[in-house]
Amino acid sequence: MAGELVAGVDLGGTKILTVLADRSGRVLARVKVPTGARRGRDPVIDTIVDSVQEVVRQSGAPFSAVRAVGVGAPGPLDQDRGVVFLAPNLGWRDVPLGAILGERLGMPVWLENDANLAALGEHSYGAGRGESHMVYITVSTGVGGGIILDGRVYRGAGGGAGEIGHMTVAPGGPVCNCGNDGCLEAVASGTAIARRARALVDDGRGAGILAAAGGDPDRVSARAVAGAAAAGDAEALVIMRDAGRYLGLAVAGVINLLNPSAVVLGGGVMQSGAVLWDAMLEEVRRRALDSSLAAVRVTRGSLGGDAGALGAVALALTPEY
Ligand SMILES: [Zn+2]
């Protein structure tokens, strides 16, 4: 068994998910712990090391059976040198995470942008399996993406490819974290959906949404809006449909640009029911060119919150991705 196992780590702003898998990608053990980013850099790195050791201990395999570790970190980063350039959620800048972990764990450690790894996870083990040309989009608190072309992660000239969340879909619209206005993330993310609903509630409207949030304005979330929309609340329906339409604009653009065989959509907002999904698909059908539309499957991701960690497993097994 020596060297037959790999670990995959999904390093997020709030939690670290670590899995141990065999060569076929079968998960043998998993550990999920809070990131505790406020403790600073070194304690977080300690927690990653502990998680890898713990997941091996849980599996019952000897540590020597592990041959490599893949790590997904918030980008942008240099995957060749294993350096995280900037991760605001972690408070990190220019951290040589790959080298530090490699030394601590005594094995090769491969680093990649978390959205690219989620794409790789769905491509290797999930809804995009077998697709040579696949685009993955995750819609949760933010909007991210990863592109697989000819079976490989497409990173672009400087590692910045796939930032679909910052595609402008509503010029003059809400201002994005990146400073531009009308980015997809600013109009279709869970944060954007919740923000629009809160503005309604603050304005004395949105009674159905407020009820879905248990009557507490502080608990008005994208989930509450989705719940109200599913129950037929008119204001919630408008918000979810608009978010879906903006998403559809971006997906249609991606289909026309890349002619992928699959577009896989993951993240919590994509689990929010039929209203947003149907509005997205309607827009895609309206705007994608017929020939490309006929060639593409638009589908939900199948790995849920495990996509990133499983992508890290795929990376550890096949670093040349
Ligand atoms: Zn932006």
Image (cartoon, helix red, strand yellow):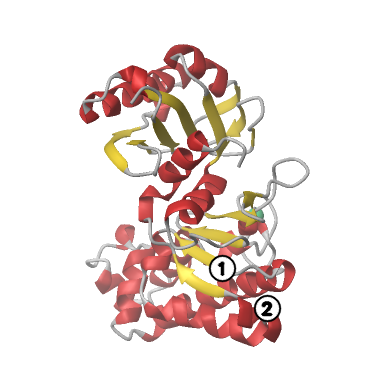
Disc 2 target residue: 292
How far across and down, in percent of the image, does residue 234 sit?
Answer: 39, 86
Quadrant housing the C terminus: top right
Q: Is residue 204 left or right of residue 241?
A: left
In the rendered view, tell whether residue 112 sits above or below residue 245.
Answer: above
Question: In the image, residue 101 lies at what x, y percent?
Answer: 48, 19
In the rendered image, residue 221, in percent from the top left (x then y), is placed at 36, 62
Q: Which residue is drawn at 62% across and 26% down?
A: 83
Residue at image position (46%, 66%) is 193
What element does badge 2 sit on?
Answer: helix
Among the 4 quarters of the image, the one containing residue 292: bottom right
Q: Where is residue 141 in the image (x, y as percent from the top left)?
A: 46, 54
Q: Dot 1: within a 10 Å radius of its alpha carbon, few (fewer than 14), some, or many (20 or more) residues? A: many
Instruction: Determine whether 171 is above or below 51 in the image.
Output: below
For this orientation, the residue located farthest to the front is 1
Q: How crowded is mark 2: few (under 14 residues within 10 Å), some or many (20 or more)?
A: some
Tell me the amino acid under the disc marked 1: Ala
Q: Which of 2 and 88 is in front in this view?
A: 2
Residue 159 sits in quarter: top right
Element assignment for label 1: strand
Amino acid beneath label 2: Ser
Q: Quadrant of the N terminus?
A: top left
